[in-house]
Amino acid sequence: MTLATVAALVACLMLATLAVLQICVAAGAPWGRLVWGGTHRVLPRRLRVASTASVLLYAGFAAVLLSRADILPGSDSLLVRILTWVLFAYFAVGIVMNGISRSRAERVTMTPVCVVLAAAALVIALS
């Protein structure tokens, strides 16, 4: 198993965990302090919709990373290569944004998640 394969599996595990969290908060679970700036214990309707949409984005993120890691087809596609670097940049920005969140719960949980996702995306992008 290559390092890129391990990184892709780790990233997918993190993205799946985030998807479960987003589904829960979209359904009204009182974990809103972990997402969307952490200002709501239970998310308002508009953020519930955004949480639902984020699950679809996570699936797309996973597909790109799995493709670039050569687990799914298309690893040599220019689009997949570019999107992998875009994901790395997105997760790197996520480190900063979650790190400066007013919500302590979001800072403590989501910043490390973004660090792992950024590291995994970097390993995959460099493969």
Image: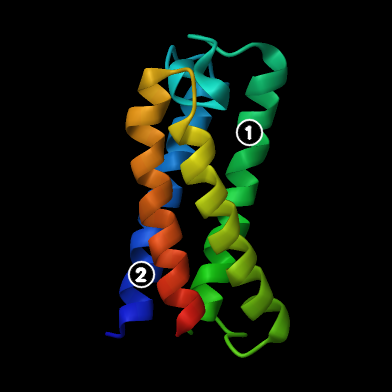
Horizontal side, residue 12 vs residue 60: left or right: left
Circles 2 and 1, Cβ within 8 Å, touching? The answer is no
Name the residue furthest left.
1
Colouring used for the render:
rainbow
Picture quadrant of residue 2? bottom left
Q: Secondary structure at mark 2?
A: helix
Distance (Cα) linking label 2 and label 1: 25 Å
Q: Is residue 92 visible?
A: yes
Foreground pick, 101 / 9: 101
Q: Amino acid at mark 2?
A: Ala
Tell me where residue 122 appears, x and y as whole percent: 45, 70
Picture quadrant of residue 107? top left
Which residue: 53% across, 44% down?
94
Which residue: 51% across, 32% down?
22
Tell me where residue 108 appears, x and y as whole percent: 32, 29
Residue 7: numbered disc:
2
